[in-house]
Amino acid sequence: MQSLGIQQDALSQTTRASGRSVENRLEENSVDIRADLTTLPTMEESDRPTGETQDIQFIGSAGVLRILAQADRLEMLALLTDQAQTATEVGRALGVAPNRASYHLRQLRDAGLVQEVGTGRKRWKEERYYLATARHFIVDPALTCDAETATSLQRKIQATFFDWRRREVLGIDLASLARQVVHERLRIQPGQTILIMFGPDGFELAETLAVEIQAVGAVPRPKFWSRNTAFSIADRFDSDALSAQDFLPAAEMDALDAVVFLSASVSQGGPPNESQRAKLPLLLESVSRWHRDLRERRIPYLEIAFAHRGEFEHGPMSVEEAVDVYWRCVAFDPAELLRRATALAEALGMDRSLRLTCSRGTELSMRFDHGSIYPSDGVITEEDRKAGRSFDEVPTGTVSVIPEPDSVHGTFVADWALVVGQRIEEPRVTLKSGRIVEIAGKSDVGFLRERIEASAGDPDLISEVRFGLNTAGRGPTGKPPLDACLDGAVTLGFGNNELIGGNVRSTMGLFLPSLRATVQLGDRLIVKDGRSQV
């Protein structure tokens, strides 16, 4: 915890608190400063240069901390979080000579804490405009903590600022999301029993959902479930106990009316050890039995793919842009998604043959069963349940089909793959009779091969093809379920597909999205170069 102490002592002024100290100084010197301001022309705000600012930046070296160990520099960072300013403007605001302010700004720039975003002419000279590289600066816990503690603290800090952006920048609150889930997506009624499954990242939303469920007179049943939970169960129970164990006791299953699963794809710990790997198929079988039972009983099951800032750090767009796309997709109008999904599902009903191509080398053909067409708008109605579609997810806006494995042959090139936090650029998979027989990529794919080999079930067997329809943003963002739902995305799925009517089981889920593919249905184009045509 020493690193957090450093953060408070050395950098507390980099938050809004420092803004207050600046305001105090302005108040104290209001006459002199404002008099100075009136003597020089000011740039129109519309002409002021702008730049990209991160929500959070970790300070990872003692050298940068030394540069920040100066009161004026801390106050300068606070001034530059909202808009770009020149050395003259910064100096005037802080009562510092322009040449001295310019020196401090250069030091901050060289340390990677501020950036030059443009120039502007002030009377007889041209001046540089500076902007902070982040709104908040945090001392990296790795400077003073062991690796495990540092990773845990970094995850907590990332989660805090993920919520900060949702709340302060986008104006989306969890209570509104919970109300949407309870009243619109699942239409929960008084007296019903609702299972809420969640891991560490979903705790706050799970709490909010539980309160809203109680508010309508229903009964929430929380259940902690994550990758680490599965490993712990494998450690605690022997094979005979796991074989006889139900995922949910029969009495709880009989009382169940709906399920909300807050899933997360952020890595938790390392791969399973040898003993865990031997037992995981038994645990997988209990989960599969439960999924089949849910489908047979047509119990609504809504999966919310919870995001984390760390998932977007290695993506092609900024973390802030990706986070915004995530929340906009979550909040996108379900009625519009239903309209688009219905149109595509009707088009898919006209033929059974698909051909996927792209300029990077995709050439893949397959057939699918019309009975496997699965539109997803994030809402589970009574009509959906009667049609056997009791599963849906958020973010959403897709139509999925389950290929006939023996018909799937060729090569597919995705934009990227994310496997336990490791990003693979342009993975290329070759499939024969629906199974992956070769993997290549622009970056190392050895880790992906190892994960497939270490997983139980059929992780190398194609389980679905998804067509994205959500127009709330463009990608790729770096989060697999999110990119799969973006308009024009074509995604190959490998892993468990029992909830959408398939019979593939696996402890590993793999999504390979492409936002550049062309898809031909019979002789009709339904996607062209990553753009929906339906």
Image (tube, helix red, strand yellow):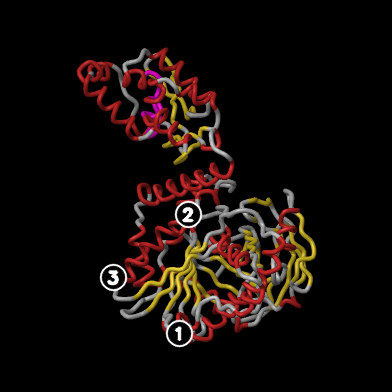
User: Which residue is painted at 56% across and 46% down in the image?
Assistant: 313
Q: Which amino acid does label 1 sit on?
A: Asp
Circle 3: residue type: Ala
Q: Label 1, on which residue?
A: 254
> Can you name the residue that lies furthest to the left here?
31
The nearer-to-camera label among 3 and 2 is: 3
Q: In which quarter of the image is the C terminus?
A: bottom right
Query: Relative to 495, is 10 on the left or the right?
Result: left
Which residue occupies 50% across, 25% down? 109
Q: Is residue 196 above or below residue 34?
A: below
Can you identify the residue that label 3 sits on? 215
Where residue 118 appears, as percent x and y from the top left, is 47, 28
123 or 68, which lies in front? Answer: 68
Give residue 325's mark.
2
Location of residue 231 in the rendering, given as x and y in whole percent from the top left corner:
61, 63
Characterize the local packing of mark 1: few (<14), some (14-19) or many (20 or more) Cα atoms within 10 angstroms: few
Q: In this view, does 315 lie above or below 282?
A: above
The answer to whether 416 appears left or right of 361 in the picture is left
Q: What element carries label 3?
A: helix
Determine the image quadrant of residue 457: bottom right
